[in-house]
Every structure is written in C-alpha cells, then in structure tokens.
Amino acid sequence: MSPRAAAALAAARLRLEARTLMVRQILLVIPFVLSASAAVFAGDAPYGWTISASSTEPFENTDAATFTNRTVYLWISCSSPGFTTYAAEFDIVSTGITHLQTTVLFPWLNAGGTSDLLLANDCSSGLQLVATFDIIDLPGSMCITPSAANGRMGTLDCPTLLFWPIEWIGYDNTGGVPCSNGTATCDGTTSVARGSWGRIKSVYR
C-alpha cells in the first residue's frame, strides 16, 4: 500500500471512530429525551416501519415458512418530507417464529436488545434498511409493538426532538395477513410533544 493510500485509510478509520463515538453518546442520552417526551399521538404518522422478507423491498411482508434459519429485514419504509430520524423505540414480538439475533446496519446503532429495540443514527431520512433479524422460520408472525418496559413506540425526529407515532407492517409466514397498524406509507403528519434539547446538553456539562 502506498503512503498516500495508507494515510487515506487511517484518516477514514479516524472519522469512523469519531462518528461511532458520537452516536454512542447519542444513545446514552436518548432515554432521557424519550422519558421527557409525552407520547400523545393522533392522526397519521410521518414514519413507516416494516419487517420484510426482502433486503431490497420493504413491503414483502409475507412468505412461506421455510422451517430453517433465515433472515428477515427491518425497514424504515418512509418518512414524510422534512422528517429525519434521530432515534426510535419499540419491541419486536414473535409468535411461532424464534427470533435469534438482531444486527443493525451502518449507520444505525442499537442500545436495546434482540427484541427490545432502542435505535439511533445520525439524522438520516427516507427509505432505509435498518437491521437484519436472524430467525428460525417456523410458522408464525413478527409484530412491532410498544416497549414492554415503558410503553413507548415511535420515532424521534432530528433536530426538533419531537417523538412521533409510527405506522408499521409486520411479517407473517402462515398464509395470513401480517399484523399491522396503518399502511406505513407516510400519508400524513401530526405533531406530538417536544423533548428537551436543554436536557440533552446538560448531560454533557
């Protein structure tokens, strides 16, 4: 490797390490922001989430059970114009299917667990492949539900720190209709409570 290429690679690694540290710091303070936000939802949601059998299409929400290990995919299927994603919190509840592991994809990080997700990134927008779910694909379903720990279910906007409702579509391999709430196509928006930016800054003081 030439000296110039080595220097460029080292600089890229430093940028990645700095960004990873920044997002991990964000993950530390997000629970404080979410707990300060009243989750009063109404109307259509500006964010859509889906669980899909496809890594290229968010709305392949049904398939035949394979009775083997396989991967399904967590997507942000849409965000309304002007909305970016700072964080999200919800659970994944599986019936019949065994959910083995969740792996978030760059630039996402997960401060939660396999099925209790607390996600964050650096304010991206639009259609996004967020994570993979490794499963044992027995007949059943996977649904997006409120957090069992605190009842929260939504997406935190960046930089306004508004916690918004979501529409969602789950995954089903039994030949039935997947569990869902809405169309996950972002047809409208409704504001909810504002988090405290000052509270975030105070964590770093």
Image: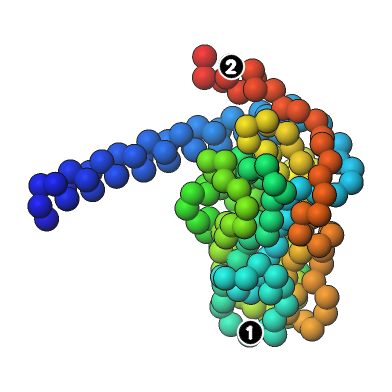
- Identified by mark 2, the residue type is Ser
Amino acid of disc 1:
Phe
Residue farthest toward the top in the current orientation of the protein: 205
Q: Where is residue 30, by image quadrant?
A: top right
| Left or right of residue 58: residue 190 | right
Task: Tell me if I can see residue 91 in this picture.
Answer: no
Query: Label 2: which residue?
Result: 202
Can you give x and y, in whole percent of width and height, for residue 114 in the image? 60, 56
Residue shown at 52%/19% (left/top)? 204
* Vertical comparison of 75 with 57: above or below: above
Which sits in the foreground, 142 or 165? 165
Q: Local crowd at mark 1 within 10 Å, few (<14), some, or many (≥20)?
A: few
Residue 75 image-quadrant placement: bottom right
Picture coordinates of residue 151 (x, y %)? 80, 43
Residue at the extreme right: 42
Identity of the residue furthest to the front in this view: 81
Task: Give the mark nearest the N terminus, 2 or 1.
Answer: 1
Q: Are marks 2 and 1 in contact (CB under 8 Å)?
A: no
Q: Nearer the viewer, residue 102 or 61?
A: 61
Q: Residue at x 63, y 43 (%)?
A: 84
- What residue is shown at x 47% (from left), y 53% (from top)? 106
Q: Quadrant of residue 187?
A: bottom right
Measured Cα–Cα span from mark 2 to mark 1: 50 Å
Q: How many marks?
A: 2
**Residue at horizontal 52 percent and vertical 14 percent from the top:** 205
Residue of label 1: 67
Any part of residue 69 in sight: yes
Disc 2 is placed on an element classified as helix
Quarter of the image where the N terminus is located: bottom left
Q: Nearer the viewer, mark 2 or mark 1?
A: 2
The numbered mark at residue 138 is none
Numbered disc 1: secondary structure: loop
